[in-house]
Image (cartoon, grey):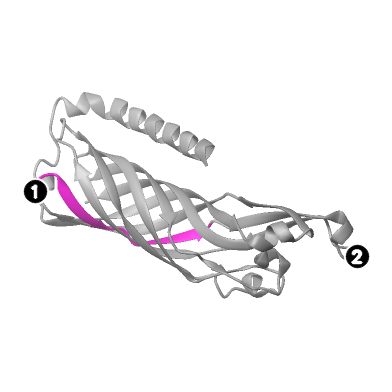
Amino acid sequence: MHDLLRKQTIGLIFCTFLLMAGLDAHSQKELYRQDHDNMDYYFGLTLNYNTSYLKTTKSAKFLASDSIMVTEPGPSGGVALGLLGTLRLDDHFQFRVNPQLIIGGSKYISYNLNPTKTKPGEASFQKQVLPSNIVSFPFQIKFNSDRIDNFRTYMLGGIKYDIDLASNSAARNAENIIKLKRYDFGVELGIGFNFYLPFVTISPELKISNGLSNIHQLDPALKYSNVLDKIQSRMIVFSIHFED
């Protein structure tokens, strides 16, 4: 988790410096879109790359059982396309809605089984892949710094509501695959930068998204499921917003 966050933070800072270097010469000559921050509302598009994984909490049956020795979640990457709607509240605060379709991000949980307890032909290492396509509805409050020429920083926080469109997929419905619930609720925190160009504002952003719901659909009859109690979603998102 920390390695992923560090890498994406470095990537965001690197992209920011590149944009600042490219825009520096222009920013001192002319201020672009000076009336943009006084607009009551405006819209845009979002492209993002995300790294997601599942945070698991083991159940009491994990300690009582000797058939599964280790269970561990793993990360995966995905991409998203979304719409952006921003409502001005005052000179520094805005309300933002950013619905997105998140494609990919097949999270997985790996299991190391006790070789003496496996069935004939069953491997001692098992990997449960959980494909997902998510429609996400984030609602955020955004705090903007003062503008410096054609540059501004901002912080944001809010909530999200997710719907997993792959919850009834054939892979999820396989008898030996653990099940995840269709709906999730969580909180988000992030930081970003606005770069004002003549006809568009480009905003790179880094965000951490943590699910609060227990999305584990427990199956007491399935050994891969009954050793787990809670499963919660985690996501690190790097976005580029294009605002009109």
Residue depicted at x 69% and y 59%: 62
Q: Amino acid at mark 1?
A: Asn
Please state the horizontal and vertical placement of residue 194, each as a whole percent of the image: 25, 40
Q: Is residue 229 magenta?
A: no
Q: Is residue 36 left or right of residue 134?
A: left
Of 165 and 22, nearer the camera is 165
Q: Is residue 92 magenta?
A: yes
Q: Is residue 210 left or right of residue 229?
A: left
Instruction: Residue 199: tell me if it is visible.
Output: no
Of 92 and 63, nearer the camera is 63
Instruction: Residue 51: tell me if it is visible.
Output: yes
Which quadrant of the figure has residue 29? Answer: top left
Residue depicted at x 89% and y 63%: 121
Q: Which residue is mark 1?
A: 38
Q: Which residue is mark 2?
A: 120
Check disc 2 and report its element: helix, strand or loop.
loop
Near mark 1 (Cα within 10 A), the count class, few <14, some 14-19 or many ≥20, is few
In terms of secondary structure, what is the magenta stretch mainly?
A: strand
Residue range of the region highlighted in magenta in the rendering: 91-104
| Residue 17 versus residue 182 in the image, above or below | above
| Residue 163 versus residue 159 in the image, above or below | below
Please state the horizontal and vertical placement of residue 162, each as a whole percent of the image: 42, 65
| Residue 135 versus residue 79 in the image, above or below | below
Q: Amino acid at mark 2?
A: Pro
Residue depicted at x 31% and y 58%: 98
| Residue 149 versus residue 208 in the image, above or below | above
Of 48 and 7, nearer the camera is 7
Please state the horizontal and vertical placement of residue 90, each as a whole percent of the image: 9, 49
Q: CA distance from mark 1 to mark 2?
A: 69 Å
